[in-house]
Amino acid sequence: MEVVIVPDGAELGKLVAAVIAGLVRRRPDATLGVATGSTPLPVYDVLGSMVAAGRLSMHGCRVFLLDEYIGLPAGHPQSYRAVVEREVVRRLDLPSSSVLGPDVSAPDLIAACADYERLIQRSGGIDLQLLGIGADGHIGFNEPCSSLGSRTRVKTLTPRTRADNARFFDDPADVPQHVITQGVATILEARHLVLLAVGAGKADAVANAVEGPLSSFVPASAIQLHPHATVVVDEAAAGGLQLADYFRSTYTAKPSWQSL
Ligand code: F6R
């Protein structure tokens, strides 16, 4: 695992956008796993500017949702499909058909989860998966005590996650209780994991994920099992890391030929 500590969210956006742009230039038909929430927005901003300036084309890419709420009316502005349409598809000039996600309106949600797993596999898997992290250590919506072997399935959000996400809704009671999320084991199959965090509110979760024991109580700790995981955090989110100085010096001394 590589941990990169940047001054703030804007620098995080530039660094991670450069990693994604590098992947897309090497592999124009790359598959990207995208997270919603606030943290990845600077990444989408920078990528959007590159596309607008004609420095990058993402037209051949496919985008996979990490998770989706169950029970919102179709087209609801806070459904993750709608968020990804707004924040990713339009800004990156991607065709809408390039966005793939679980079918939360299917009458058989268990079958819809299995279908989504198959869709990811048939597409050749995900090249780069962006991840945020919940204050409770969730990745995707794998809440504490999610099996580290879990696959895409229906989960119930914790009251804390619902409260954290209430800022996106007019009424906190409107935050759905249920979601479909890629499982922890599904996420671990992506070829490169890039976990992002900003702000002091994420410091404990980041420290537990990076330096704590591997535990389903902190699902994000599962990234310790991945052969290519990059954690990009701002100074505030790095506040709980015992090895912060080591991570800083490692990054400063990184050979120029070695990419993230
Ligand atoms: C969203 C997702 C969640 C968020 C996490 C952090 O698709 O999977 O795990 O990444 O809740 O959210 P923010 O970035 O809003 O703090």
Image (cartoon, helix red, strand yellow):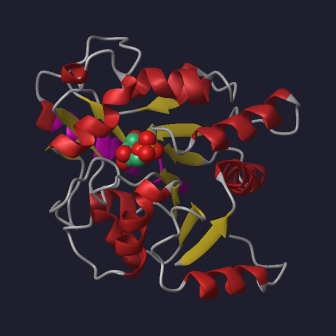
Query: Who is closer to the viewer here, 78 or 120?
Result: 78
In magenta segment, residue 215 = no
The residue drawn where x is 58% and y is 77% is: 2
Q: Is residue 168 visible?
A: yes
In the visual, does 216 lie left or right of 235? left
* Residue 26 against residue 191 in the figure, above or below: above
Quarter of the figure with residue 222: bottom left
Q: Position of residue 207 (x, y in %)?
A: 41, 73
Q: Is residue 255 left or right of residue 162?
A: right
Q: Is residue 175 above or below residue 231?
A: above
Residue at the spot 23% in from the left edge and 55% down from the top edge? 151
Magenta part of the chain: 111-128
Seen in the image, is 27 located left or right of residue 112? right
Question: In what quadrant of the picture does the C terminus appear?
Answer: bottom right
Closer to the camera in the image, 115 or 79: 79
SS majority, magenta: helix
